[in-house]
Amino acid sequence: MNALSFIPLLLALILSPLLFGVINRTKALFAGRRGQPLLQTYYDLWKLLRKGAVYSRTTTWIFRAGPMVGLAAAWVAATLVPLGNFPALIAFPADFLLFAGLLGLMRFFTVVAALDTGSSFEGMGASREVFFSALTEPALFVVLATLARQTGQLSLSTMFEPVSGADWLHGGPVLALVIIALMIVLLAENARIPVDDPNTHLELTMIHEVMVLDHSGPDFAFILYAAALKLWMLGALVLSMVLPSSGGNPWLSLALVSGGMFGLAVVIGVIESVMARLRLLVVPQLLIGAGAVATVALILTLR
Amino acid sequence: MTWLLFAMALLLLGAMAVLLLGRPDRNVSWLGAGSVVIASVLGCVPVIHVLSGGSVEAVRVPWSVPFGEFFLELDPLTAWFLFPTLLVSALSAIYGVGYLRSWQGRRSLGPVWFFYCLLVLGMMLVLLARNAVLFLIAWELMALASFFLVTFEHERESVREAGWIYFVATHLGTAFLLVFFLLTARETGSMDFTVWAEKGIQTRGLADILFLLAIVGFGTKAGFMPFHVWLPEAHPAAPSHVSALMSGVMIKTGIYGLLRALTFLGAPAGAGATAGRPPLWWGWALIGIGLTSGVLGVLFALAQHDLKRLLAYHSVENIGIITLGLGTGLLGMSTGSSMLIVLGFGGGLLHVVNHALFKGLLFLGAGAVLHGTGTLEIDHLGGLLKRMPWTAATFLIGAVAISGLPPLNGFVSEFLIFLGAFKGGVSTGGAIAVPLLALIAGLALIGGLAAACFTKAFGIVFLGEPRSEHVSHAHEADWTMRLPMLILAAGCVLIGLFAPVVVGSLQAVLENLTHLQPAAVSENLAAVASPLAWVVIGTVAFLLLLLALILLRRGLLAGRRVETNVTWGCGYAQPTARMQYTASSFAQPLMDLFRPLLGTKKKISPPRGFFPEEAALKTVTPDISHEEVYRPVFGRINEWLSQLRWVQHGKVQLYVLYIAVTLIVLLIWELR
Amino acid sequence: MKHEALLWLLILVPAATGALALLLRSVRTILGAMCAGVGISVALGWYVAGKVLMSGPVSAGAEWLYLDALSAYNLGVMLLIYGLSSAYASVYFRVELREGHLTLKQARLFASLWCGALAAMTLVFISNNLGIMWVGIEATTLLTGFLICVHVTGESLEAMWKYILICSVGVAFAFMGTLLVGASAHGLGLRAPEVLLWTRLQAHAGSLNPACLKAAFIFLLVGYGTKAGLAPMHNWLPDAHSQAPAPVSAIFSGFMLNTALYCVMRYVPIVEAGTGNTGWGLRLLTGFGLISILVAAAFILFQHDLKRLLAYHSVEHIGIITLGVGLGGLGTFAALFHTLNHSLCKTLAFFAAGRLGQMFGTHDMRKLAGVMRVAPVWGMGLFGSLLALIGVAPFALFMSELQMLKAAVDKGAILALVLFLFGAGVVFVGALGHAIPLAWGKAASTVQPARAGTLETLLVVVPLVFLLVLGLWMPGPLQTALNAAADVIRHVSPALAGSPGGIMP
Amino acid sequence: MMTDLILVLVVLTNLKLLGSSRLGASIRVVAAQGVMLGLLPVLAHVHELSLHFAALAVGTVALKGVVFPWLLFRALREAEVTREVEPYVAYITSILIGLAALAASFWLGGRLPVSTVEPSSLLVPSALFSILAGLFLIVARKRAVNQVLGFLVLENGIYTFGVGIVAETPFLVELGVLLDAFVAVFVMGIAVYHINREFDHIEVDRLDRLKG
């Protein structure tokens, strides 16, 4: 591995919080507001890290462990994710299993931490979280299987290489479907509209936000940062497929990816501005739909 | 081998001793447990020797029973299953000492330890036997002993019912095995497993029939859907250390039997030559069974309100996962792809061990909860972590492991199966790819649901506020019960951390099972060991980062104001325990989604009036195959046979008439 | 030679004891004398049987008495059962006496009939003349008829009436069959006294008249089958068993049925040879065996009376034995082995049922529950024997049934295999459903537990251990004995006889 | 010649039994049948009349002709019944069935290649017919006495058969038969007596407490 292979990791670690800023800006613009500064997330993190913490008497060490496990897992996962032309720091056959596993671990501990508070709201959020993730998990794996079949590769870095026009020519529909499915997975996993609304603070409607209600101070900072990383990672996967290949020129590709990521953030922002959050009962249909789309893609690869 | 013989002799002696000694109970417990532990230690010596590439050991003693021969053999396959058996047996035995203490005085503990020793002995014999008659005897001994253990608390109606269902199921399964063995014996003209393995079954049609017989016969013991009905009944009924033993290792004898059977059906021998290759549909069948058992198993687990019932259904799920591995391996056999064979069988075999570890751990944990609180109703528990920290910690490890999450052992075995499925699914054509891709999607779903189920189990039982009085007087288990849980938890972690090494240890058993060239096996194992090495690196990195974060957090919070308060409840000053989310409400969304599959019955009495006095919601999820398959079938047979009642309705004239008619009909028929 | 004397003694001793019992004045002495007499004949019988099994057949009284491996084996088992049952009878009736249910008259009646029945059954086994053999069966029927109603009640009378009537009809058929066998030998130039000697017929079996022989065998099968309790001629059996006192039920199931079945076995080689070894007779046996198994299974499912349940188990197991003989080859061996196992097991079961019945005052399994707690020893006896009866390993019955299945598979009799397994499965489900509550259910509070004495404990433990040992290890002598006996039925020439080649793989 | 005559008479008596409702009459008919059968061997073996046959004849006549009727009449007196009330099968039907059975017996007799001492084509069929008739009486009648009679007729049939092929059946066995028949009837008589005392009726169809 050379110096370049650290780029995706570094970008992820440094730039991921910026995504929230961009998204919020976009939404603000749509709403005709000035909106919060782009770097708001960084300010928040900094502020939270300097604060003390309040804990519920009900909670135990699980509650405190949750955020840290989540962040650690996110960090390790970040080393597996390629970015555009940059392969990931670590790449090995079926590394996506570890990737998915780490995200799962993150979720597991977020959920138990939420249950640790004994609050009905957080229980509700936890319940929904596991519900939706149980549905996104197969979708994600079918997507992976499709790509693996399409590219004959078994590592994120090689499966999600930028696609050339040729690929679009001979596998266009497959790629399109995969991207759609993956996009839905991304929105669901990161609790964005149309699955979840990170802005409202009406607990009953929320999933991710409500699970972390009781966290405060550094713990909450960890959570926030981990969430940003997760968004970045899945984003990076989607992006890597849509980006055109940049004949090996590092600077060009650097520009491409950083531009691309924020483009993606803008897209998300747009989606959130133009769409409303789906009713909870409809969400499963959306997620199963994602799985179905992915399956169609898979079947296309089978013929 | 001598070690093993010693071990078995010791078990027999121990059994007799506890039976004769009878009282005082305390010593009986120690005597029984002691003999099991020592026997296991003795037994482990040759097992490890064989697994580490030592030569296969055998002992043949003539046995004065028609067609019987006391023929034991310790080959790697046997050793692979024997290891977890011995380990879990010993640990459960230690646990049992503490667990059974509450019955001291109320009940003579002699019998329970007697049958415990016999059960362990039976399992050892089943794994070692190479003579059909000996195998069957051991198989039945195992069933009988476990039956008496399941019915330990026979004062309770439900326990008696469970015992009945269990014994009936296992015995009917044995009926299929009898036919399987006898047909094979007829074909090969011998009762000797080694001969069977050499000759194999050449006629295809017969092999297919035998395959099906083996699936039903061994599948009943292993708990394939829909032959699993006895599991959710028997495991909750049995004392927890017995549940751990049964669920952890006894049901694996079914898997072992299936593998052994495959070696007779000329399947593994044909991995190289096209001649003895199994037909594709065998692999399809196993993967189908695996998916059904896995998905339905975890769904029903999610629907349960009783902790041990939930765990029992998870055994069905994990047996499903193991079967997926075997199915992948069989597909490999059919296509002669050593990669699929190694990864499939390897993953399945490894999951056998892993499941033994974490399911044993979880059942022991459940036992500790029952022991401490006196209930297993998940919705009556909560906040136990504060009162039972050790149990909670180990249970958490078990929960993460069974959800197949890194860095623990569950992830490793599923990694193998997934990898095999991906490699196969990527490279090959439809006939192979389709089942493998289905496997991928299914296993992913299973994983997600399992995580959901165990966040529920752990979260509701151990976290939050106590939901009932039961918890208030809860107490942590004593060391005899804690130690085994700790050891098992350590096992889960270690296998996770030393995954590549562990995978390497599959070499011997895979060669023995699949008759592949050692080279073929080792290179495929190497091909999976290297990614696992990366996984381990990632794991280590994860742990280091975690440590760093812990230090960071401590540093940050040092000297700052860290206050404690009640959980923020949107304005409720005092959130009562009643307001918490319950297991049922936690699982409700998934349950609603899968209602068609589960057939959950709801009984709702909604709140009425302005000041509702009371409201209630009750959901029960009866086992689908029990309700839809067995009950109707048994009922049908029953009423069909009761048509015969009139035959014996008291009139002597009629009886004489039967005789006369029989005579005349026969005469006319035979002399016509 | 002295075997002659012994053979005569075998009949005389019990007969004499029976007569003696009528003269004695106290119940205890009567029971004592009875046990003593039975004990002596057991000793004698085992000695002779042992001799025969070691060193070939013996005969006496101008060949009218004859003991070969088959009869010796059956005689041995019968005496074993009789010995156990007599010991048990003394226990059982002492209790009756204590509770004042037993008068001197009844005791005398019982003891004399009991010994008389023994004499009659012995006659069946040691007589070479098929006619005399038949006389023995008939005598058994009539003597045991009264044993059913030692206590005269409506039910016991009804049972006795049905038993006498049905069995007399059956036995009459058996005689018809015997005559036909004689007729089939017409023209062989056998002198009148010889014509019914089994050994003679056996020697000339090849040249008997087939059609006549077939008719004869049908009559014999239906006739003796009635006595043996083969469905559909079994209907007297549950009534008689449920009404007779426990010791009597024990010998009914324990060996009277097998005695009748033995008579059928006697004819099998002759009929097979006479009908040109086409397996004609064996097919009939297989059919009756399967029907009995299935019918018994049906009735076991919905049975409430413990002793009736056991009776239907007898029907099932007699069916299994018949099936084994019908399968031939290894099946014959297994059938004879099963005879021993079943007799032991069923005797124990009836012992337990009897004592528990005395404690609970009923045989209704809806009231008879939790025996393991009320009376651990007898409870264990009952539960253990029930488990053994439904074929749970490692009891011996599992072994013999396993061998029988192997015989069926090797013979390719798949239909028989399937039906057998189905029947056995139904029996298992049904009987286990009865056995579990019986053992552990909630016992009525009115029942007073009774401590079991040493003798009673022995009566439970010995048979159980026996069954267990036989299930895990078959002694060499037993195996040779079984082979020798089986060879008589399989009609293997003396050269081969007794060689283990018959069954070992 | 004489044999045939007797056999025909036996057949007729059987039919009479099927048709009669009076128990007393039935008993007498059976007695008569017994006497005839007692004479049968003598007549069958006129040429080589031996002590054996004489004894057999005497014994038979004594038992079947005297003792059994006496026992049965005693039982009747005990039970104070004189007639069979509404049997399962009406008398006319019984006779028709009897005729059918007769035909069947002839068919079967033809099938059975039994060579009788005195070649009488009637012997085997009439024997079989007696057996069937006896069975029919047991099955179709309600009074215990009638069933004893049925059993006797059945025994008579077998006896007839035995006599027919007497050359092959040793003397001892025949005595055994007689003895058994005697004891059987004796036992049944006692049973009837007991039953009557216990239930004050001897209607067998009401003995159906034990079932299932």
Image (cartoon, coloured by chain):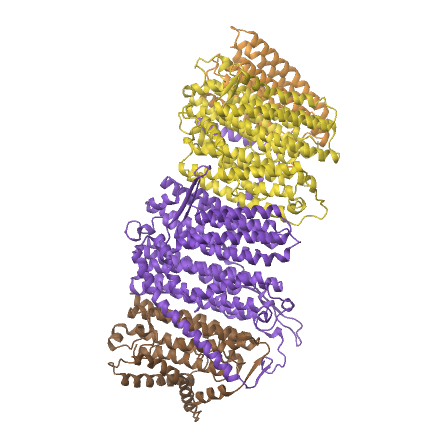
Chain colours: A brown, B purple, C yellow, D orange
Question: Going by the image, does A274 lie left or right of A126?
Answer: left
Q: Estimate the x, y position of residue C270 in percent, counting from the top left.
A: 45, 23
The answer to whether residue B421 is above or below residue A189 is above
The answer to whether residue C131 is above or below residue B26 is above
Question: Going by the image, does B436 lie left or right of B664?
Answer: left
The answer to whether residue A59 is above or below residue B241 is below
Asked if residue B631 shows in the view, the reply is no
Q: Estimate the x, y position of residue C203 in percent, counting from the top left.
A: 43, 19
Q: Estimate the x, y position of residue B233 in percent, counting from the top left.
A: 55, 56
In this view, the residue in front, B300 or B573, is B573
The answer to whether residue C361 is above or below residue C14 is below
Q: Residue furthest bottom?
A: A34
Residue at 58% from the left image edge and 42% from the top image edge:
C384
Asked if residue C210 shows in the view, the reply is yes
Q: Estimate the x, y position of residue A221 in percent, counting from the top left.
A: 48, 83
Quarter occupied by the C terminus of chain B:
top left
In this view, the residue in front, B388 or D122, is B388
